[in-house]
């Protein structure tokens, strides 16, 4: 028997329940992993609330974790029982959005929303290593200090400052080459206003709700802008591409240019509490659940 968090209906964090389950045996090409740590991401909240439809109810949650292989299915040759592994559809996807969606070569100025979060903390360090000027938006001075410590070139406290005006001041009116926006609905037009002519808007999240009802003509009005909505599955669509992305990511970790800040740890049974903290923007760095 094992424990898992599941939900039988969409709603607030109260719909999450800790239940006993019997793990299935791995099928063809599959392995079974005994999780030692589970990553928490906003996509978990999207599924719980119904913004993203779950494949079946009751449904489990979670798209990333780390653990040990405890069973191997037929046809698997690259993994064995006892191997330590990690899997992800969160921060590694953020790397694709930062590096693959737009080839940053150094010298560019970019805007990154939620710069003190798990993805933002990685982005700040990665941008600095590339020689990119990252302007990070944050909600408090504490988060601003964290983003700067991680390598942000500048920060903007959107609780106290006008983001567009501050970007204009910081860039001497040049504005940004790229905006990376995981917030969604609340920051859509603001993000577009922070771009230079023919700049790129990378919308990769919906923390405030999905961006909808968009008149594509606004891209012309604001400077012949480009927009993309990437996902990990859209870039790591073959094993070869996934391995290439992982190799580059882990190379950055091994070099010490990027350090992962696991700032919040919750027992698996408190998954709802952890999601509430993430949704209310009380967390910084990465959050994990411990089975």
Image (cartoon, helix red, strand yellow):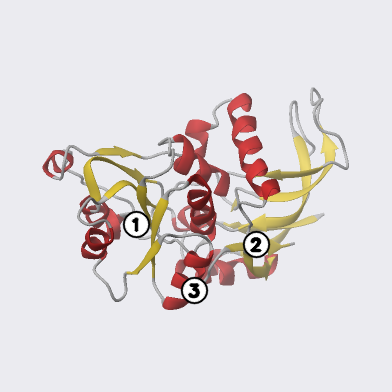
Residue found at the very far top of the displayed protein: 75
Residue found at the very far right of the displayed protein: 82
Q: Distance from label 2 to label 1 (Cα)?
A: 23 Å
Q: Which mark is residue 288?
A: 2
Q: Is residue 192 left or right of residue 180?
A: left
Residue 229 showing in the rendered view:
yes
User: Which residue is more in the foreground, 225 or 60?
Assistant: 225
Task: Name the image quarter holding the N terminus.
Answer: bottom right
Q: Position of residue 229 (x, y in %)?
A: 37, 40
Q: Quadrant of residue 281?
A: bottom left
Q: Secondary structure at mark 3?
A: loop
Q: Distance from label 3 to label 1 (Cα)?
A: 18 Å
Q: Secondary structure at mark 1?
A: loop
Q: Which mark is residue 209?
A: 1
Marked residue nearer the N-terminal end (2 or 1): 1
Label 1 environment density (alpha carbons within 10 Å; few <14, some 14–19, many ≥20)? some
Above-or-below relation of 197 to 290: above
Residue at left 53%, top 49%? Answer: 129
Label 2 environment density (alpha carbons within 10 Å; few <14, some 14–19, many ≥20)? many
Q: Which residue is mark 3?
A: 282
Q: Dots 3 and 1: beta carbons under 8 Å? A: no
Label 3 environment density (alpha carbons within 10 Å; few <14, some 14–19, many ≥20)? few
Q: Is residue 215 left or right of residue 52?
A: left
Front label number (2 vs 1): 2
Q: Dots 3 and 2: beta carbons under 8 Å? A: no
Q: Is residue 256 left or right of residue 115?
A: right
Above-or-below relation of 280 to 186: below
Above-or-below relation of 174 to 55: below
Q: Position of residue 149 (x, y in %)?
A: 53, 66
Marked residue nearer the N-terminal end (3 or 2): 3
């Amino acid at each position: 028997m094992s424990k898992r968090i599941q939900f039988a209906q969409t709603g607030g964090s109260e719909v999450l329940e800790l239940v006993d389950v019997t793990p299935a045996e791995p099928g063809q090409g599959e392995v079974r992993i005994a999780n030692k740590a589970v990553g928490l991401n906003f996509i978990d909240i999207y599924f719980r609330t119904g913004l993203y439809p779950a494949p079946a109810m009751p449904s489990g949650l979670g798209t990333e974790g780390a653990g040990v292989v405890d069973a191997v299915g037929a046809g698997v040759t690259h993994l064995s029982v006892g191997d330590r592994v990690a899997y992800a559809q969160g921060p590694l996807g953020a790397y694709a959005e930062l590096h693959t969606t737009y080839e940053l070569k150094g010298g560019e100025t970019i805007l990154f929303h939620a710069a003190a979060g798990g993805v933002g903390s990685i982005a700040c360090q990665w941008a600095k290593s590339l020689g990119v000027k990252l302007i990070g938006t944050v909600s408090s001075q504490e988060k601003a200090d964290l983003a700067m410590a991680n390598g942000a070139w500048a920060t903007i406290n959107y609780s106290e400052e006008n983001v567009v005006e501050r970007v204009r001041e910081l860039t001497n009116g040049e504005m940004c080459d790229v905006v990376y926006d995981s917030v969604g609905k609340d920051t859509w037009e603001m993000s577009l206003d922070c771009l230079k002519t023919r700049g790129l808007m990378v919308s990769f999240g919906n923390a405030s709700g999905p961006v909808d009802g968009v008149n594509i003509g606004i891209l012309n009005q604001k400077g012949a802008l480009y927009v993309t909505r990437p996902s990990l599955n859209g870039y790591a669509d073959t094993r070869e591409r996934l391995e290439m992305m992982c190799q580059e990511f882990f190379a950055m970790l091994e070099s010490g240019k990027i350090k992962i800040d696991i700032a919040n740890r919750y027992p698996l049974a408190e998954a709802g509490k952890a999601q509430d903290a993430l949704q209310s923007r009380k967390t910084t760095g990465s959050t994990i659940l411990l089975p």
